[in-house]
Amino acid sequence: MIEITDKTRDEFFSEAQEIIETLSRNLLSIDAMEKQGRTDPSLVNEAFRAVHTLKGLAGLFGATRIGSISHTLEDLLDDVRLGRQPLTVAVLDVLFVAVEAYHRLLAAEKSSTDEPIPVLDELLTRLAAIGGAVPSRPTQQDEYDLDPGMLAVLTEYEEHRLRSNIEQGLNLYRLRVAFDLNTIDKALEEIKDRAKLHGEIITYLPTGDVGGGDTIDLDLMMASSEDLAVLVGALGADNIVIEAVPRRRRPTVRPMGVPAVAVVIEQSEPAPAAGGGLSVRREDEVPVPVVEHHEASLRSVTQTVRVDIRKLDHLMNIVGELAIVRSALSRLAERLRAEGQRQFGSELMRMHRSFDRRLAELQDGILEVRMVPLGQVFDRLARVVRQISRDAGKEIRLVITGAETEIDKLIVEELSDPLMHMIRNAIDHGIEKSDVRASVGKPTAGTIALNAFQKGNHVMIEIEDDGAGIDEAVLLTKAVAMGKVGTAEASDLSRDELLALIFLPGLSTRDAASDLSGRGVGMDVVKTNIGKLGGVIDVQSERGIGTKLTITLPITLAIVSALIVDVAGRTYAIPLATVSEAIRLDESGVRVVDGREVMTLRGSTLPLCRLHRLLRLDVPPGWRRQFVVVAAVGNRRLGLVVDDLFGQQDIVIKPLGRSLREVRGFSGATELGDQRVGLVIDAAALIDELLTGFETRERSGGRRWVTS
Amino acid sequence: MLRVLVVEDSVSVRAFVRNALEAEESDLGEIEVVEAASGFDALRLLPRGPYDLVITDVNMPHINGLELVQFIRGSDQHRDTPVLLISTSSSERDRERGLALGANAYLPKPFSPESLRAEAARHLAAGARRTA
């Protein structure tokens, strides 16, 4: 006898309910489109699938009345989707009545009653009035050289759509898309959404073996009225190869031995990059014998190229150099005008402006090519979280938002280790064991939220857990024990400063013996690595509530945020990643220790470096207000004394020419927008150079510094 | 322990199949049922095989059952795994195509738990003989 448990029966009711609601929404969309004179075949197909699924469910679960009307409706919708029955208002009316009938029938089924349902009779009357379907037209798909493997797996509906698109004279394309198996559903939806604007996807076919790898190639057959070049422009991406399926105008005479349906896929010519005629030669315009056809297919031309990112770096450097040429041009134009050559000057200025616009476009274009979604690294993290949480014996819910946020490819590559460290810490140290969580009234499963979003020229990534939070008292005790913080200054530290102690090398919030991870994961390493990417990391934590780490990264490594400063009337840039703060210089607080000027900053000694002296610049006479820019790399700090602060700016660093490459202390030059060129101060190198000598009480000496 | 991969986009049909295979009156022995809610899920789960039997729906969005059969038959890992197609449409065309692509059987819905078990048993036994 049939043994259907109550639980599976409930499953049936809730799923049936869901399907009927989806069908109802679907019909409303079809109706709205119909009123505008449009149809979307995929919506009709979805309606068919809904009814089809209902029929299957009803059969399995013994809901005979639902089964029998589903059977009739399925036939009707099948005729509609296969083009044998036009989608008239009468048909739509029937379908709306059907939704009503379904609701009644499901309710009756639930309460196990067989009472008559009036709307059912109305439905049957209307169905009878619609009448029969018209026979479909013969197939013309042999007009194309289609892969027999693909044809063999088309469902009846897909075959119909293929036929119908060919009859409308549309072009067929094959899109080979490489998907990450873990994100394929979402990625495919995105492609579908974009493709919808240009045509119809007829079928999806997996190719090759997944065999342990995480990627799979899918062949998408698509019909579109547009040219290959247009499609490539609209849908092209580095994981998509688009090819036109060749069409032959008349049945071609085939040489002996060639199968009736030849497998020919390659044909596409490369699309012209820009400008000029965008037409793509098609086989039907130039009839070629079949033999040559196959020769042509050897010449596989894809629409995408893989580029080494270093080549893009090189292009970016050229942009940087051109920016400096641009500044020179503008100065020249100004000079010409000042010297009375007004016409020349104005003409040159016009050229300069046009050059300026194009250069900005070029820079944006290169930057855009480097961008990839953060989802690439997040997906990897999601897999590892499952593993770690199992190892740690904790239940973890990972919630990811903003996976579509784009960032420089090079940054993504370098992010996965630091993020992994932080998530591991959150699981090992942050999230409590489930019994502990239960005892404080938290849900037993811990939550780790990974949020990414763009903010101006930066990408923010937050790693937030709802764990125990950081015990700053423990942090402080350790920092004092390690001699990193003096007992006297310990009491002066604010809570933020206390929390920042987790970035000190060798500090762990757990004793090594009880350290679950036992991997010696140090937040100092994380901070250093993020710093190398031009990013900064902040920590917020609330005892008993959780911890939030916020990483601020530049969108691209090719552009960095910098503090623009003045030293003796010249402009310099100091990348913000190496700047911890800027303060007013109080000359009265400056002391000399071992021949070096130092000052005291919140209880600790800060060595100073007067940049004008280092750079041997003449200081104009008179009293000047000065600032100290505190550069910090790891836990080494150096105060750079400058004459003025101009504020923050995003800059493109251009490497120095060969003659200056030997010079330490500068990482490159940059164009500062208002026609000025400035050198970029390499604070890390300065700290290395100046403090190593200072700390070991030895003179480095003999190093050549740049003088202009 | 036998492992069966059930590919079906309807949650209640999956539950029905699981119920039938795991039922007390089943004489299939101990069975682990792995559920895939879509063709993509199946592609993700297949590399984690081997499976002793794959039961798949024919009509599913994106990757349909026929495509799955072709994929399974073309993969080194699963070439010999028996595949049972289940479908609501007792479509002769789908049945023929499925069997031509290498499916072992085609079971039109509705079917009873008994007939599903009988069909599964037939192919599980055949598979066991092949691997022995």
Image: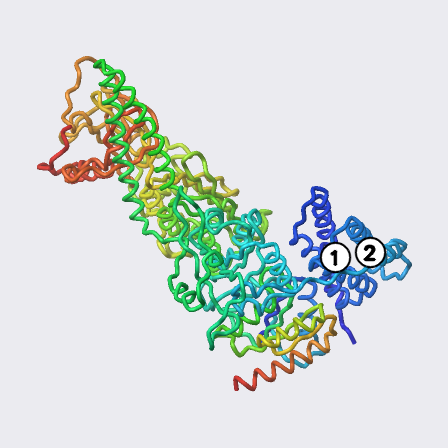
- Chain bearing tag 1 is A
Q: Are marks 2 and 1 on the same chain?
A: yes
Q: Which residue is mark 1?
A: A85
Asked if the residues shown at circle 2 and circle 1 are in contact, with their CB atoms under 8 angstroms apart, the answer is yes
Residue A672 higher or lower than A442, as above or below: above
Indicate the quadrant where residue B83 lies: bottom right
Q: Position of residue A264 (x, y in %)?
A: 47, 65
Residue A164 higher or lower than B18, as above or below: above
Other-residue count near label 1 (Cα within 10 Å), few / some / many at <14 / 14–19 / ≥20: many
Residue A169 circle label: none
Q: Quadrant of the image for the C terminus of chain A?
A: top left
Judged left or right of residue A431, residue A41 is right
Mark closest to the chain's N terminus, 2 or 1:
1
Can residue A699 be seen at all in this image of the molecule?
A: no
Q: Nearer the viewer, residue A246 or A667?
A: A246
Judged left or right of residue A690, residue B104 is right
Q: Residue at x 45, y 56 (%)?
A: A241
Q: Position of residue A10 (x, y in %)?
A: 75, 60
Question: Amino acid under label 1?
Answer: Gln
Judged left or right of residue A409, residue A203 is right
Q: Position of residue A396 (x, y in %)?
A: 53, 54
Residue A567 higher or lower than A309, as above or below: above
- Chain bearing tag 2 is A
Q: Which residue is mark 2?
A: A130
Q: Give the SS element for disc 1.
A: loop
Question: Amino acid under label 2?
Answer: Ile
Q: Quadrant of the image for the N terminus of chain A?
A: bottom right
Q: Distance between the Cα atoms at labels 2 and 1?
A: 9 Å
